[in-house]
Amino acid sequence: MNTKKILILNGPNLNLLGRREPHVYGSQSMEQTLNSLRTQYPELEIEYAQSNHEGTLIDTLHQVGFDPEYVGVVLNAGAYTHTSLALADAIRAIDTPVIEVHISNVWSREDFRHHSFLSPACKGVIAGFGMSSYRLAIEALLS
Ligand code: DQA
């Protein structure tokens, strides 16, 4: 049997995790988080992609979104969460379930972060648990 795959897909500015506003996003890098997740879930193939470009994020969703080997996508779309109808449409267009993830608790922050175009298109939302939000999203996909 093929290994089950999960794609973690990060959007703009999340390439700077560990360095970017550590008081909001913590000091752990994505690489450290991925190492820990791959150790915790040896039965999964955890793929990772990041882009600062909306179209590239959409292309990536199209690439994995019809492949039954993927259990799901863990998507932190960064600020595109609050602006992108095109990403919401891409999530609706694909077969693979998508979990929306945020490191910070977006509802305890500025008003413009309270609205997500993506949430209605996603299977669920996990926010506010720091880098553990990624692990909790994987648990949600496996449950
Ligand atoms: C974020 C929250 C967004 O509002 C913000 O634009 C980000 C990161 C989070 O993980 O907490 O870039 O998605």
Image (cartoon, rainbow, N blue to C red):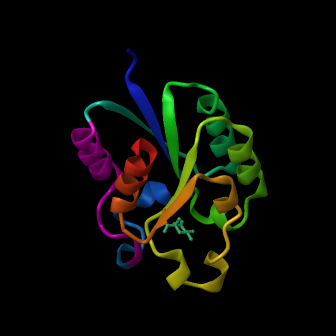
Quadrant assignment, res 56 = top right
Q: Nearer the viewer, residue 130 or 120?
A: 120
Quadrant assignment, res 103 = bottom left
- Residue 124: x percent and y percent? 55, 57
- Residue 57: x percent and y percent? 63, 44
Q: How many marks?
A: 0
Residue at 71%, 51% in the rendered image:
87
In the rendered image, the residue lying farthest to the front is 143
In the rendered image, the residue lying farthest to the top is 1
Above or below, comparing residue 106 to residue 6 in the picture = below
Give the magenta part as a residue range.
Answer: 24-41
Residue at 58%, 52% in the rendered image:
123
Q: Is residue 121 left or right of residue 31?
A: right
Q: Main secondary structure of the magenta part?
A: helix
Residue at 65%, 49% in the rendered image:
53
Whether the magenta-drawn stretch holds residue 68 is answered as no
- Residue 75: x percent and y percent? 54, 51
Q: Quadrant of the N terminus?
A: top left
Q: Is residue 43 left or right of residue 73?
A: left
Residue at 62%, 53% in the rendered image:
122
Above or below, comparing residue 76 to residue 49 in the picture = below
Q: Nearer the viewer, residue 97 or 8?
A: 97
Q: Is residue 10 left or right of residue 143?
A: right
